[in-house]
Amino acid sequence: MDLRGLLIGPQIYGELLQGCVYERDLYTGQQIHARIIKNGYLIASNEYIETKLLVFYAKCDRLEIANSLFGRLRVKNVFSWAAITGLHCRMGFHQDALMRFCEMIDSGLSADNFMVPNLLKACGALQWIRFGRGVHGYAVKMGLDGCVFVSSSLVDMYGKCGFLGDARQVFENMPQKNVVTWNSMIVGYVQNGFYQEAIEEFYNMRLEDIEQSRVTLSGFLSASVNLGAIEEGKQGHAIAILGGFELDNILGSSILNFYSKVGLIEDAELVFSRMVEKDVVSWNLLISCYVHREQIEKALDVCRLMRLENMKFDSVTLASILSACASTKNIKLGREGHCYSIRNNLESDAVVVSGITNMYAKCGRIDDARVVFNTTINKDLTLWNTLLTAYAELGLVGETLRLFYQMQLESVPPNVTSWNALICGFLRNGEINKARDMFSEMQAVGVHPNLATLTSFISGLVDNGFCNEAVLMFQKTQEYGIRPNVVSIINTISACTDVALLLYGRAIHGYIIRHELWSQVPIANALVDMYVKCGKINESKRVFGMILSKASPIYNANDSFLSLTHCLVQA
């Protein structure tokens, strides 16, 4: 057309720019923009062209240019407002997006069903529930709540803000639901810790014959791993295979994360080998899996392979390597990790600096750990707790106490982990009275003990011969609404190996039966040992027989058998 001298008007330029929007073709779009300017002010100042140019740059995420064009617009219509609001939302400037919306309303224009979802996304990201409710009211007033995209965004917003009752109400009242709607509900449950409800919603979705997406399966797998629901997670993997989904970064990483967290390492390795795309997250998941299962050499081998693939370590990779060094007390490799963090400007990352501090402490270089701590400008609570725990584990209770008071002087309020470190330090040194005082003071300032607090206290009391008090502390776990773990149960049973405390031991035995903890081999062995040491041979035989009848075929009863045999020999 241009070569033939035919007039190219605003409509044609607008269509060309729209094509560049679809392709996100910034270079070609800029060439068209240059031609528009070259053709003179008449076309360049056309309202339609100005809006199209703004939409083009906004869709290509060119924030500075889009803001400049928006500021020069003589007429701002709903399309230009929607473009600039959506851009700010995508770039993470959620508050600016909402302020733009307020300006638009003040100008007398109304938002449409394309703009409202962006506003709700911003409210969810900021967790501005009151603003979100206002947008909800606006959508109802303008008759936009019947749009499936708006309603799905409402479900997502309420879920991100933690108001699942409102999310559920919107979900139930929707006349039409698509896969995005179901995903929003499932993800909302997962993000707020309602994992069982997320799994049930997934199955409801299948009953409704709604086709699942990668997001659906990722949410379902996340719920499964948090519940330790191995069969459900395997079903999610099977559905992904049957659905023909490729193991890309999103879905592949979700399946890999599931197998890693539930301890199925061979399955995790197989999924990793079959992933069509592997990003740094995928590599980190496998490395972390090996570290948590104490397969340190395998973790380091994967790190070497990662470097051979020209993948750069990020803060998560480095934290896993430092954790491996701490576990193996490999100070040489740990120092290399420290140097790598400095060379790659990661030494100020909160996760990395805590990992470096912990690594030096675990390797017996507490002075080096302190140097790292002192030279860190922005110390977060995790870093303070890392050094506190290191001092406590070494029995340096004086240093632990000084650091505990120093953090408060620097306006860093201690949390339950901080208090736990201090209490553990006193218990380790046998200073039971001071540990008790700290336990009482912690509660007096409004910090509630957690499972780690009570488990450590029970263990410390038993180690220092305060068996009766250890049993009472175990009873307090019920009062606090905390379910004891295997360690606390075993320690409390070991406190009841005296005939005077056997009554409590029998009560704990009843607790074990009620909560079906027979499959825990260490607990079963501890029970047999308790009855043996209290001279209750018949009861120890009965427990031993029950263990054999209820245990799995691979149950190893050697410890229980040895305890029972020892008692019979003595008798």
Image (cartoon, rainbow, N blue to C red):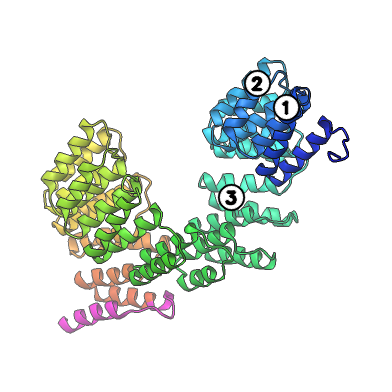
Q: Nearer the viewer, residue 325 or 542?
A: 325
Q: Which residues are magenta?
A: 548-571
- Secondary element type, mark 3: helix
Check the picture and name the quadrant holding the C terminus.
bottom left
Residue ID for mark 1 = 50
Q: Distance between the Cα atoms at labels 2 and 3?
A: 50 Å
User: Identity of the amino acid at label 2?
Assistant: Arg
Q: Earlier in the sequence, mark 1 or mark 3?
A: 1
Residue ID for mark 3 = 197
Q: Which mark is residue 72?
A: 2
Camera-side mark, 2 or 3: 2
Q: Is 448 one of the magenta-colored residues?
A: no
User: Identity of the amino acid at label 3?
Assistant: Glu
- For label 3, the crowd category at 10 Å Cα-Cα, with few meaning under 14, some 14 to 19 and many 20 or more, is some
Residue 190 position in % (x across, y down): 54, 48
Residue ranking furthest to the bottom: 569
